[in-house]
């Protein structure tokens, strides 16, 4: 999993991409424009997690057009968490790292508020959307996830988690150092007792695609969370250790640009 990139900078944004070709151009443009407007150096790591549409072609074009973008293609679909781990590994030299979704339901400009909150001294800050309009199974799934976290991690009481977060580079290094064949970033984060906070936001309506988290996939995800992050679950853990991801190809990057 070692990378020959040696990035260094203030901020990197890591996005796990899956069948999101229509949203990628706008996502990259808004991210770059926002941080340029704040005069903060930013790099984007866009990880294609086995997409079956033309997401990879779009990512290659974006990386060719802007040296601040690194496009990575995994050999197959490893899952969002493992794809994000790949991005964190590649961007590990940055002071702060943001992870977010690829469908623009995580407003790129909200990253500024996450960054400002992290600069107050937090190791980890989650942007928490209003979930009142989510399907019932998603709300139940979130409750189950929070219950599992309470059992297997030191998650502070009252803290909620989401895929939209900022963490320090030091916390990211600890997560990557302890990576296993399955990783759940929030569970891995809380193993290190970070100083954590929440930032509420109003989530915009979905404009592209649909959620890939069906009830079946959520059940599989939470089963793995139990297996890999609890002591009782270790009884069901595979004896042979696999790899969390494999890179097939990559395009662009910022090596030696600072």
Image (spheres, helix red, strand yellow):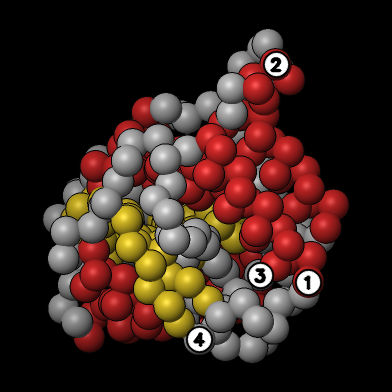
In the rendered structure, the answer to whether residue 146 lies left or right of residue 107 reads right
Question: How far apart are labels 2 and 3 at the CA level?
Answer: 37 Å
For marks 1 and 3, the one nearer the N-term is 3
In this figure, what is the number of numbered marks? Answer: 4
The percent coordinates of residue 117 (x first, y second) are: 24, 70
Label 4 or label 3, whichever lies nearer to me, is: 4
For disc 4, the marked residue is 202
Mark 4 or 2, nearer chain start: 4
Is residue 131 found left or right of 220 in the rendered image? Answer: left
| Helix, strand or loop for disc 3 | loop
Q: Nearer the viewer, residue 240 or 144?
A: 144
Quadrant of image for the N terminus: top left
Name the foreground residue: 67 vs 136.
136
Displayed quadrant of residue 103: bottom right
Circle on res. 136: 1
Tell me which label, 2 or 1, sits earlier in the chain.
Answer: 1
Q: Secondary structure at mark 2?
A: helix
Which disc, if any, is residue 20?
3
């Amino acid at each position: 999993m070692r990378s020959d990139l040696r990035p260094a900078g203030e901020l990197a944004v890591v996005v796990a991409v899956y069948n999101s070709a229509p949203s990628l151009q706008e996502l990259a443009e808004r991210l770059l424009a926002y941080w340029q407007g704040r005069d903060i150096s930013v790099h984007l790591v866009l990880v294609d997690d086995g997409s079956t549409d033309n997401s990879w072609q779009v990512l290659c074009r974006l990386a060719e057009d802007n040296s601040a973008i690194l496009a990575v293609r995994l050999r197959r679909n490893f899952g969002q968490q493992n794809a994000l781990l790949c991005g964190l590994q590649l961007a590990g030299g940055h002071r702060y790292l943001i992870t977010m979704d690829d469908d623009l339901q995580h407003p790129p400009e909200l990253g500024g508020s996450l960054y400002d909150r992290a600069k107050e001294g937090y190791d980890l800050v989650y942007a928490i959307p209003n979930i009142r309009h989510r399907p019932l199974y998603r709300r139940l799934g979130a409750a189950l996830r929070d219950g599992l976290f309470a059992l297997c991690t030191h998650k502070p009481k009252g803290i909620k988690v989401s895929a939209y977060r900022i963490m320090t580079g030091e916390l990211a290094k600890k997560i990557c150092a302890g990576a296993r064949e399955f990783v759940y970033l929030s569970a891995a984060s809380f193993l290190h007792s970070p100083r954590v906070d929440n930032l509420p936001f109003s989530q915009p309506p979905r404009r592209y695609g649909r959620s890939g988290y069906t009830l079946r996939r959520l059940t599989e995800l939470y089963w793995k969370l139990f297996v890999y992050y609890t002591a009782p679950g270790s009884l069901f853990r595979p004896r042979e250790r696999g790899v969390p991801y494999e890179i097939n190809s990559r395009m662009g990057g910022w090596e030696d640009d600072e």
